[in-house]
Image (tube, rainbow, N blue to C red):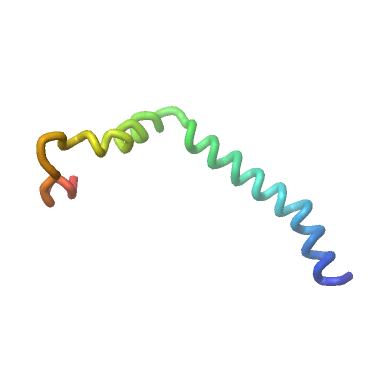
Amino acid sequence: MEEYTLLRQFADSWMLLLLFAFFVGIVIWVFRPGASKEYKDTANIPFRHQDKPATSEEARQ
């Protein structure tokens, strides 16, 4: 069997299944219970220091 044909068949079958499982895993990871607190905290980073920029000590926290 030709190398291109072999790789093409692998990509059309097992690699497609592997990448689909990876995609589903990422979606489950993002929407898992308890993740919303982490994402809300990350989303509010720009609003933490309204009066002045963060100091180097505060930035390490």
Give the residue displayed 32% in from the left and 35% down from the top. Answer: 43
Give the residue displayed 79% in from the left and 61% down from the top. Answer: 8
Give the residue displayed 31% in from the left and 38% down from the top. Answer: 42
Question: Quadrant where the C terminus lies?
Answer: top left
Relative placement, left or right, of 45 versus 56 is right
The relative height of residue 5 versus residue 59 in the rendered view (above or below) is: below
Query: How many labels, in total?
Result: 0
Asked which quadrant contains residue 37, the reply is: top left
Relative placement, left or right, of 41 versus 57 is right
The relative height of residue 37 versus residue 26 in the rendered view (above or below) is: above
Relative placement, left or right, of 59 versus 45 is left
Q: Position of residue 23 (x, y in %)?
A: 60, 43
Give the residue displayed 39% in from the left and 29% down from the top. Answer: 36
Q: Position of residue 38 (x, y in %)?
A: 34, 35
Q: Position of residue 41 (x, y in %)?
A: 29, 34
Q: Position of residue 58 (x, y in %)?
A: 13, 45
Among all residues in the image, which is located at the extreme bottom?
2
Q: Residue 24 or 53: which is nearer the viewer?
A: 53
Q: Residue 55 or 3: which is nearer the viewer?
A: 55
Question: Quadrant where the N terminus lies?
Answer: bottom right
